[in-house]
């Protein structure tokens, strides 16, 4: 943690990780500050980029997107032009929840979500095959999701 984040900031961040919908007043009560002081800390943490945004966690199965697949992507070449083209193209592909450049035996790891295996197969044939520089993919379909969204960051 940067030196500018103190114990009270950590309490504030932990509380927001538990429930980002807390009002400033409720958050202030929880961390033991005034509402004004809490609001100012939140503004400072947003300006510093510590708080990057607020989001809602969805039940993907309830939305009909119960199939998760992790896809290893190996590129034809590993040079700046291919990396740039891939990064630009992958950003707008529906179905890709996460994309990480990794070190090791392949170049990118994608986390994707789909209705079912037929939907994934269409995604593989239409979307992944169209990405620039893709030489090879390897898919791992999730049988059971044990931890989703991850725990709060340890502060």
Image (tube, rainbow, N blue to C red):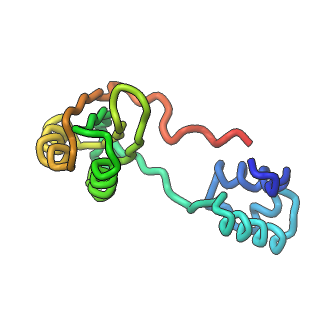
Q: Position of residue 138 (x, y in %)?
A: 24, 28
Q: Is residue 36 left or right of residue 98?
A: right
Q: Is residue 18 left or right of residue 95?
A: right
Residue at position x 20%, y 44% from top? 128
Residue closer to the observer: 36 or 95: 95
**In the image as oriented, which residue stretches furthest toward the bottom?**
36
Q: Position of residue 111 (x, y in %)?
A: 35, 40
Q: Quadrant of residue 92?
A: bottom left
Residue at position x 74%, y 47% from top? 1
Q: Position of residue 84 (x, y in %)?
A: 33, 54
Q: Please determine whether, in this image, residue 131 is positioned above or below residue 111.
A: below
Residue closer to the observer: 91 or 78: 78
Q: Please determine whether, in this image, residue 26 is positioned above or below residue 90.
A: below
Q: Quadrant of residue 21?
A: bottom right
Quadrant (top left/top right/bottom left/bottom right) for the C terminus = top right
Q: How many marks?
A: 0
Residue at position x 76%, y 56% from top? 12
Q: Please say whether residue 30 is visible from this viewpoint.
A: no
Residue closer to the observer: 151 or 70: 70
Q: Is residue 149 left or right of residue 13?
A: left
Residue closer to the observer: 1 or 51: 1
Q: Please determine whether, in this image, residue 143 is positioned above or below residue 113.
A: above
Residue at position x 41%, y 46% from top? 59
Q: Please say whether residue 105 is visible from this viewpoint.
A: yes
């Amino acid at each position: 943690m940067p030196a500018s984040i103190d114990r009270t900031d950590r309490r504030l961040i932990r509380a927001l990780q538990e429930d980002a919908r807390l009002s400033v007043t409720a958050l202030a009560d929880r961390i033991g500050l005034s509402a004004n002081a809490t609001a100012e800390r939140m503004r400072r943490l947003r300006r510093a980029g510590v708080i990057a945004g607020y989001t809602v966690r969805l039940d993907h199965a309830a939305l009909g997107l119960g199939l998760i697949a992790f896809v290893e992507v190996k590129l034809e070449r590993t040079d700046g032009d291919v990396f740039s083209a891939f990064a630009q193209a992958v950003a707008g592909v529906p179905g890709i929840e996460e994309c990480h450049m990794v070190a090791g035996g392949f170049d990118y790891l994608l986390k994707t979500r789909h209705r079912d295996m037929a939907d994934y197969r269409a995604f593989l044939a239409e979307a992944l095959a169209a990405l620039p520089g893709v030489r090879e993919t390897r898919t791992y379909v999730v049988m059971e999701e044990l931890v989703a969204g991850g725990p709060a960051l340890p502060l």
